[in-house]
Amino acid sequence: CEDECECECECECEYEDKDIVVYDPLNLSEEEEKERLSFIDEVEKQCKARANKLGLPGVEQQEMAEGICLEMVLIPAQIFKMGSPKKEKARYHDETRHEVTLTKPYYMGKYPVTQEQWELIMGSNPSDTKGAKLPVTNVSWEDCQEFIQKLNVMKDTGYRLPSEAEWEYACRA
């Protein structure tokens, strides 16, 4: 709901129906979800503190069109262990953990690119399940490169896909 009321009030929200089932891929208990959100809050505080220390904004917003923004989060330079720990589920037997140094901070999308963002830049929406705020799907690496190239021309920016090390560091943070 746009009023962020979580439909507990008497708003004129299209999401008032209490029969809506929300897909929760984590399937967490209420207590686990509270812990998860608390952890996210703490990480966001740490990111803001690091950004302040670097003299950079912790979050950058690029307006693509009226009401459509890309939200980018600062990821600080860091030394980390890349690769799966031996006890991680679905770990490949040939993975080797090794130290990687990210020498420069970088910005990364806080959320996946939405269908409305993709359609604004590319002029079409390849996703099977449609929804403006849903992540775009059915796109290849080449499609993403074309999206970034068009976005960079449109907004005179320097966006790129993250390297494998940047991606893993951000995901494991």
Image (cartoon, grey):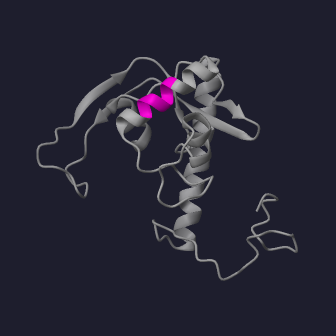
Q: Is residue 101 left or right of residue 59?
A: left
Taking the spot 21% from the left edge, 37% from the top edge, the residue there is: 97
- Residue 2 position in % (x across, y down): 79, 57
Please say whether residue 148 is one of the residues in the magenta stretch: yes
Q: Position of residue 129 (x, y in %)?
A: 51, 61
Foreground residue, 112 or 64?
Answer: 64
Quadrant (top left/top right/bottom left/bottom right) for the N terminus: bottom right
**Residue sitting nearer the eye, 166 or 61:** 61
Residue 96 place in picture, x, y as percent: 16, 38
Q: Is residue 68 left or right of residue 167?
A: right
Which residue lies at the image location 57% right of the left edge and 39% below the top edge?
123
At 43% across and 35% down in the image, what residue appears?
144
Q: Residue drawn at (45%, 29%), measured in percent from left and top?
A: 146
Provide residue 161's location: percent of width, then percent of height.
43, 29
* Residue 140 occupies quadrant: top left
Closer to the camera in the image, 155 or 7? 155
The answer to whether 84 is drawn above or below residue 127 in the figure is above
27 versus 80 height, above or below? below
Please state, as top left, top right, bottom left or bottom right, where the C terminus lies in the image.
top left
Main SS of the magenta segment?
A: helix
How many marks the image carries: the answer is 0
Q: Is residue 10 magenta?
A: no
Q: Is residue 37 above or below residue 67?
A: below
The answer to which quarter of the image holds residue 58 is: top right
Looking at the image, the residue that sits furthest to the left is 94
Q: Which residues are magenta?
A: 144-149
